[in-house]
Amino acid sequence: MKIICSPSEKYLNKKSNADLRVFIYGHTKNRNFATCGDSIRRYFKKKKINLKEDAWDFLSFAISVVACDLGATRKLSPDGWTRHIELEIAVNNPDKWNREKNLIEQLLRFLSTDIWQVKFIKGGFKDSIEESGSKSDASCVSLISGGLDSLIGAIDLVNINEKPLFISQIVHGDRQKQSDFVAALKKPFEHIQINHSFRSPLPLEPSQRARSIIFLSYGIVAATLLKKYENGKEITLYVCENGLISLNPALTEARIGSLSTRTTHPYFLEMLRELVKNLGFNINIENPYQFKTKGEMLSSCKDQFLLRKLAHKSTSCGRFTRNAFTHCGRCIPCLIRRASFVKWGNRDSTTYKYKNLRLNDPQHAGFDDVRSAVLAIQSIQNRGFSAWFGSASSVLPENDRPQLRSVVERGMKELQLLLNKFKLC
């Protein structure tokens, strides 16, 4: 599938041979075009935030990837899953981006499991704001999604006297929660909430394997807004996620119930760090919880009182919106969340639609994710952890491999404690 992304309607009109043409940072009356990113442009203009060309280019890259991920339907692929995506992106500095073509294609292939061919062309977006606002005096940048892991990360950062600039991607049902979490911290912190607002004439692809790259790009762009960055200092972007979810192991050989994203997998983050450095950004991306389980994150949080007050209000469920903003209680993220509360030893007052996993029907114990978790635990018990984890070790950084294997093993033990509670294994 050929997809072209540009801020020029005139250029897009010339490319009628493309399967999807995406007009970025603007609206159009042309119903044959998709649109993406206009709300971002309007937000920065309203706040008098003047982004540099390299920041706009990184946003354009991320927006274009997300547009492809949403606009290219997997079921039309020969195998019903792997897409062949030929992507053309307009940027201000195409030579610099084209030098990273191989790394970018490798990064995207790992992230979305598709085959990518990426080309950068001249014609990137830049928005001139006459009266630019002042730079932020934050010490770092931290993503805050409304989820439990990023909440713990925020609490820990302010308790070691960091002053983060918090960045959120607005998700239906979580906007107020994101604001409430930042407001609950010890003192006022800067908080940016934005969304890319993609619209397309084509049916949307539901898998969205690459969706979080736009969230990471917000953090990278935000780092360029800090006074420290302007003064030549390296900025740390904190991306907080537990090690089990980060490593995304397949629970069964058939991959039933495997975790869906690879956005914080250490292999992906290493490639992203390399890309960011090669493009000239003085930014380090760090997941401080790479070697901790979700339960360990809860237990070691530096403000237990605040965490007990807020933890149940966070969102973990992969089907939260589809369940009328209620946790389903049976998807893999919900199971790991519930297991972490058992490990923590504090009451989980989260409302779950399917609470009693002991019920032997397709909605509870027979649900695919629950069944796959049970099968994984049984496989570990019968064959040993190493045999179950298998080939997943091959993409782990060699120096960190023992710690990464260990965090998955401990995470699976947390999951086992939950399943034992319901007498499922």
Image (tube, grey):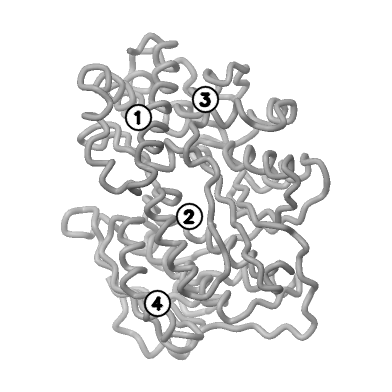
- Tag 4 secondary structure: strand
Label 2 and label 1: CA atoms lie apart by 22 Å
Quadrant of the frame with the N terminus: bottom left
The residue sitting at 77% across, 41% down in the picture is 185
Pointer 1 with pointer 3, Cβ within 8 A: no
Task: Give the residue at mark 4.
Answer: 21
Label 4 and label 1: CA atoms lie apart by 37 Å
Pointer 2 with pointer 1, Cβ within 8 A: no
Of mark 3 and mark 2, the one earlier in the sequence is 2
Label 3 and label 2: CA atoms lie apart by 23 Å
Q: Quadrant of residue 148?
A: top right
Task: Give the residue at mark 3.
Answer: 340
Q: Residues within 10 Å of mark 4 (few under 14, many from 20)?
A: many
Of mark 1 and mark 3, the one earlier in the sequence is 3
The residue sitting at 68% across, 53% down in the picture is 166
Of mark 2 and mark 1, the one earlier in the sequence is 2
What residue type is disc 1 on? Answer: Asp
The residue sitting at 63% across, 21% down in the picture is 349
What residue type is disc 4 on? Answer: Arg
Viewer-side label of 3, 2: 3
- Tag 1 secondary structure: helix
Foreground pick, 248 / 179: 248
Task: Give the residue at mark 1.
Answer: 369
What residue type is disc 3 on? Answer: Ser
Q: Position of residue 299 (x, y in %)?
A: 60, 25
Q: Is residue 100 left or right of residue 252?
A: right
Labels in figure, total: 4
